[in-house]
Image (cartoon, rainbow, N blue to C red):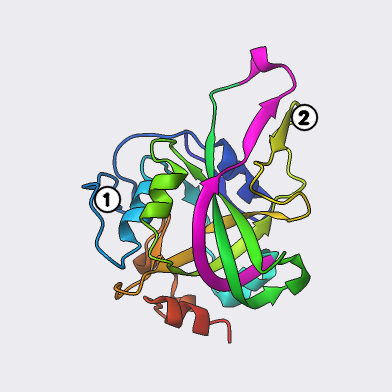
Amino acid sequence: MKIVVMSAAALALAFTATACSGADSGGRVTAVSGTSTAGSVRELTELAGQNVHVDYDALTSPADARKKADLIVEGTLAKVENGIRLAAANPAQAGPEETYVTFVVNVQKVLDGDADKVKDGKVYVSVYTDGSTSPAKLTALNPQAKVVAVLDDITNWRPSPDETVVRPANIPATAPLYAPYTDGMWLQGQSDTQMFGVGAEASDLPAGWKHAKTLTQFSATFK
């Protein structure tokens, strides 16, 4: 099953996506060797996004991102930890378990939005995965990658009237929960010559992004 992300509110539907096998329509490689290139974030993004397919409405420009997002930040991916869990009021009626990880981002700069929403210098970003790669594995592949993230606040999101979101112990109770726009979160390691997304390709960005291929270029579009 595929989902369509049409707006900040509809972004929450990404958390009900069903994992599938194969490569996505953007030609993203989902089978990786298991060996990483030193200083590159490519394998981390491939493993985080493998077997997960999301149809989405592209962010057309920085102005569009500012209009839709609750927070836009620039920083460093500190680590990947356990993610949120969906709990059904009646466990007997629960659907297939969905798997998330948390990208913990140390924020260096708030590009748009309320800086007070950054708690102790961090934001906690929920990323849907197929569950085949542990947070520890993703952390091991993290070259302390630089990040720019266009984020939707999902703190009060309920997947359905019968489900609630349970945050893991690693996310402080007072910290907002965020989800990234599919084509709004980009990472780049020190040895990378381009930025990488989770389920998105820089080459697919609309012209409004001034053909940004690197994180520096993407960040500069917000200035």
Q: Residue at x 50, y 64 (%)?
A: 77
Please tell me whether mark 1 sits on a helix, a strand or a loop: loop
Q: Quadrant of residue 145?
A: bottom left
| Amino acid marked by disc 2 | Pro
- Which of the pair 190/92 is nearer the observer? 190
Q: How many marks can you see?
A: 2
- Which of the pair 4/153 is nearer the observer? 153
Q: Is residue 173 above or below residue 144?
A: above
Q: Residue 187: give x, y in percent of width and height.
A: 43, 66
Residue 130, can we see it?
Answer: yes
Where residue 161 is drawn, which disc sits there?
A: 2
Please tell me whether mark 2 sits on a helix, a strand or a loop: loop
In the image, taking residue 32 as reference, residue 134 lies left or right, namely right
Residue 60, can we see it?
Answer: no
- Which of the pair 106/161 is nearer the observer? 106
- Which of the pair 31/68 is nearer the observer? 31
| Amino acid marked by disc 1 | Val
Q: Which residue is mark 1?
A: 29
Q: Residue 18: give x, y in percent of width and height.
A: 48, 33
Q: Main secondary structure of the magenta part?
A: strand
**Range drawn in magenta:** 71-94
In the image, taking residue 206 as reference, residue 33 lies left or right, namely left
Q: Quadrant of residue 111?
A: bottom right
